Image: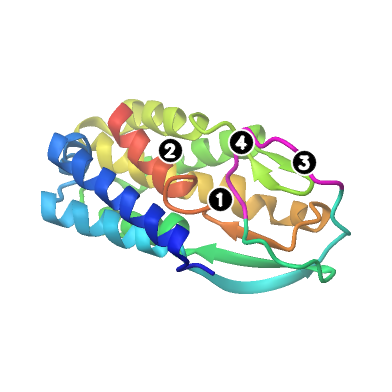
Amino acid sequence: MPFSLLYLALFLAALGMLMVLVQLGLVTMTFEKLGLSQDSAFLLLFLSLFGSAINLPLFSLRSRAPPRPVEKVFYGLLRGPRLAWSGRTLVTVNVGGGLIPVLFSFYLFGHTPVGIVETVVATVIVAAVSYRLSRPLPGLGVAMPVLVAPVTAALAALLLGGEYRAPLAYISGSLGVLIGADLLRLRDIPALGVPAASIGGAGTFDGIFLTGLVAVLLS
């Protein structure tokens, strides 16, 4: 159950940690680069954390039977809830880790002087690197090293963004991962043998949202 006592305890612990980070100024500094106040930053983080428990179903794909369980998981990007195998994979989008970062990226593009050419070029770079270095793992999902996309987005923003490199880093990092490691990998899902795959990772701190924030910090 998404709101079990264990989940509630983890949610409160994560919320408390977020409050500490905001007070320390780390998260505030990140969002100040994006033009948000401390209150707005905390609201966005709160909604993203809450939304990480929500996966909106999109469609299902016929897929192969799941392989033997994998004992260790080192990194993940596209994972889903534990469901019984039915011969199909349910593809969902995670609200906190996928939908909110995309909406915020479009907000930044419309409210900052980031150029469309620079945005497209930086996003294509991050998408290409994300696709090249992501790997479908049978029984798990699509995975990639967690720092590859943020570092790529930060470097692209430094080269192309000028004084607006922070919003460019967030936009290209978020949309680049979505395109390169999620959307372009949809064709690999039937071979994974998973009952569900969530675009945006396991939630706020294991997917697109984290990529955007780290990219801003590095830019």
**Quadrant including the C terminus:** top left
Would you identify the image quadrant in which residue 65 lies? bottom right
Q: Which of the two labelled residues, at mark 2 and mark 4, occupies the earlier sequence position?
A: 2
Q: Is residue 72 magenta?
A: yes
Q: Which mark is residue 70?
A: 3
Q: Which of the two labelled residues, at mark 1 and mark 4, occupies the earlier sequence position?
A: 4
* Kind of residue sitting beneath label 1: Ile
**Quadrant including the N terminus:** bottom right
In the image, taking residue 212 as reference, residue 177 lies left or right, namely: right
Depth check, front residue: 93 or 69: 69
Q: Which residue is mark 2?
A: 122
In the image, taking residue 200 as reference, residue 122 lies left or right, namely: left
Depth check, front residue: 82 or 162: 82
Magenta region, residue range: 68-79
Q: Is residue 31 magenta?
A: no
- Mark 3 vs mark 1, CA separation in Å: 26 Å
Secondary structure of the residue carrying tag 3 is loop
Depth check, front residue: 201 or 1: 1
Question: Which callout, 3 or 1, points to the residue nearer the camera?
Answer: 3
Contact? badges 1 and 4 (CB < 8 Å):
no
Q: Which residue is mark 4?
A: 144
Q: Which residue is mark 1?
A: 179
| Whole-percent x, y for residue 91 in the image | 65, 66
Establish if 63 lies above or below 136. Answer: below
